[in-house]
Structure formats: structure tokens, C-alpha cells
Amino acid sequence: MKVSIIIPFFNASSTIERCIKSAISQTYKNIEIICVDNNSTDDSVKIIQDYIKNYQHITLYTELRKGANFARNLGTKKASGCWLNFLEADDFISEKKIENQVKALKTKSPFIASSYYYVYLHGDKRKHKIKYLDAWKDLFSGNLGITSSNLFKKTNVIEVGMWNEDYNSSQEAELMF
């Protein structure tokens, strides 16, 4: 079962390499990495192009309409995986993240919610653990994962109309609803 890692980015030359390295380092190997440039003017595209030379499972697309959700939707359309992991260009994931989530999958699950860490620039980190006490309450309160921590079933993302391109924040909660 293939997982598509979709990374929209805009002027992310200071963080995109760490993000790409974390995607490449996954212990689950049936992945593709789809990078979507959203009108960058820095060296972000060149950094990705350098990785493409050495990794055949990385592709690069350009979305001319501004906004991360436009880029996420283009990545979704281009994805060949049946499960999607959306990363922000300043995110990074542990090497077993996708492997562990794939092990937890059930065919009827529209997405897998996962705990995550906030890592601050000065190095401190704070874990956000999902307790799964009440899925509806967690969804309403924003405690059911974030964009990069969750794994989404592609057919369900398409069925609900993909990412709402009118949203600038809290878009993962709207998608999960």
C-alpha cells in the first residue's frame, strides 16, 4: 500500500531540507514524495531539484495560485498513493511514523490521528498526546491531530472536496469534519 507524502512550500529554503530528509528516511518504503512549489522566490526549488537527482520517488510541481491548500490539492490530484501524509515545509517526522500508522490502519478509517511534538527554535519540545476519549469532542476542540501528524485516506479526501481553498488556518479540522 503506497503512501504519498505531500509537501507544499513557499520560500522554505531554511527548512525544506530537514523536511525532505525526514520523508526520505522513513522505514516504510512504499512511499512517494510530492513537493509543490507555491511561487517561491528563494532557493527552495533548487534544493528540491538537487534531491530529485538522487531519489527517484520525489517529484516537483508548481501551483501558481497562492495558498497552501491550493498546493495540497494539486499534490492530492498527482498522488498515486491510497494514503496521504501532508507535511508543512518546516515539519519533520520520525522515521517510523508512516510505518506505525500503516500498521494501525483499518480499511474503513478515513484518517489516522496521531500525537505530535511542537519543537521550538531554541530546541525545547512539547508533546501533544491524543487521548482518544471522545473523538467528536476531540475533533471540535482541535485535539485530533494536526496536518502533519495525521494520515488521510485519499479517496475520502477527494470525496469531501479536498482542502477548502478559502481557509487560511484550521483547515485540517475542517477537512476531518
Image (cartoon, rainbow, N blue to C red):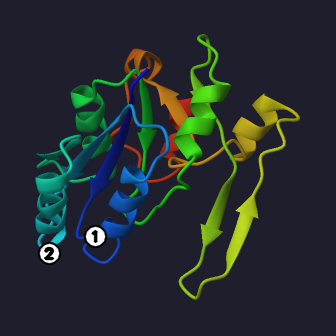
Q: Position of residue 18 (x, y in %)?
A: 38, 68
Q: Residue furthest bottom?
A: 122
User: Are there few (<14), some (14-19), or many (20+) residues within 10 Å of tag 1?
Assistant: many
User: Are there few (<14), some (14-19), or many (20+) residues within 10 Å of tag 2?
Assistant: few
Q: Quadrant of the C terminus?
A: top right
Kind of residue sitting beneath label 1:
Ala
Nearer to us in this view, 128 or 171:
128
Nearer to us in this view, 76 or 81:
81
Kind of residue sitting beneath label 2:
Asp
Report if the CB atoms under discs 1 and 2 are less than 8 Å apart.
yes
Would you say 68 lies left or right of 151 here?
A: left
Image: 28 above or below 26: above
Q: Residue furthest top?
A: 108
Kindly indicate the quadrant of the structure image that contains residue 100: top right
Q: Quadrant of the N terminus?
A: top left
* Residue depicted at x 40% and y 20%: 82
Under circle 1, the secondary element is loop
Nearer to us in this view, 49 or 152:
49
Q: Position of residue 121 (x, y in %)?
A: 53, 83
Q: Which mark is residue 20?
A: none
Q: Is residue 177 visible?
A: no
Q: Position of residue 42 (x, y in %)?
A: 14, 75
- Residue labelled with disc 1: 12
- Residue labelled with disc 2: 42
Q: Is residue 17 visible?
A: yes
